[in-house]
Structure formats: C-alpha cells, structure tokens
Image (tube, grey):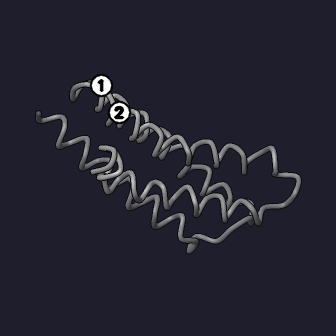
C-alpha cells in the first residue's frame, strides 16, 4: 500500500516542486551556488520532508505541527522565488511558481481537515 505520506497529494506536488526548484537553480549564476540557490533548495526539500514526518507521527496534533512547518518552509521558498525573479535569475512563469501555489492550497486543505478531527 505504500507509506502514508505517499498517498497525500500535497506530498506529491511538493516532490515535484523540489525537482522544479533544483532545475531552476541549476541555471543560476555560479556565484549563487552557495547563496540563494542553496537556501531555495533547502526550503523546497523541507516541504515534502515535513509532510512525510508528520504523516509518520501519531495523532492529529503532531501531524498539524509538521504541516505548519511545511507551510512555513513554503512561505520562505515563495519569498525566495520572488527574489530570484527580482534579481533576474528566473521568470515568474517558471513551473515552480504554479507548483508552489498548488502545494500551498493542498497544505491549507490538509490543515483545515486535520484541525477539525
């Protein structure tokens, strides 16, 4: 049946977002290798990682905590995506923007669902 987090659409989209961020940042200038690109990659990886960790925990309260952390990492990444556009490293039509938006909506839905339980 697979692991619980692998069934979650939020996790699936977050994994696609990580791939898109890695692809995007591979085109950044070399001087950004240890700057913005690394911060973006860490924030992106944190999103599905926290979804998975939360899904592997016991109870709604713990899951909600990790969904909150994932949402925070997403907000950080969205800021960094805007910075990347502002600095001319990418364009706002990059796939990462749509994936970030969709992931955010799914995380909000998960948060609402588990807050009720």
As drawn, the residue found furthest toward the bottom would be 93
Q: Which residue is mark 2?
A: 54
Q: Which residue is mark 1?
A: 62
In screen coordinates, is 103 left or right of 36? left
| Residue drawn where x is 60% and y is 56% of the image | 81
| Residue drawn where x is 52% and y is 40% of the image | 46
Q: Position of residue 2 (x, y in %)?
A: 32, 49
Q: Is residue 89 above or below residue 52?
A: below
As drawn, the residue found furthest toward the front would be 1
Q: Position of residue 38 (x, y in %)?
A: 72, 45
Q: Are marks 2 and 1 in contact (CB under 8 Å)?
A: yes
| Residue drawn where x is 72% and y is 51% of the image | 37
What quarter of the picture does the C terminus occupy? top left
Q: Position of residue 70 (x, y in %)?
A: 43, 39
Per the image, label 1 sits on a secondary structure element best described as helix
In screen coordinates, is 65 left or right of 110? right
Please tell me the numbered disc located at residue 117.
Answer: none
Q: Position of residue 21 (x, y in %)?
A: 61, 59
As drawn, the residue found furthest toward the left would be 117
Q: From mark 2 to mark 1, how far is it between C-alphas? A: 6 Å
Which quadrant of the structure image shows residue 9? bottom left
Per the image, label 2 sits on a secondary structure element best described as helix
Q: Is residue 112 above or below residue 26?
A: above
In screen coordinates, is 82 left or right of 101? right
| Residue drawn where x is 66% and y is 54% of the image | 83
The front one of 13 and 3 is 3
């Amino acid at each position: 049946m697979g692991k619980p987090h692998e069934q979650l659409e939020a996790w699936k989209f977050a994994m696609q977002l990580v791939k898109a961020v890695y692809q995007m940042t591979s085109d950044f200038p070399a001087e950004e290798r240890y700057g913005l690109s690394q911060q973006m990659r860490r924030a992106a990886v944190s999103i599905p990682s926290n979804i998975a960790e939360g899904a592997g925990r016991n109870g709604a309260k713990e899951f909600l905590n990790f969904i909150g952390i994932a949402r925070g990492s997403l907000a950080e990444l969205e800021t960094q995506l805007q910075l990347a556009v502002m600095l001319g490293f990418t364009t706002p039509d990059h796939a990462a923007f749509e994936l970030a938006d969709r992931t955010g909506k799914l995380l909000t839905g998960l948060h609402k669902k588990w807050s009720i339980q």
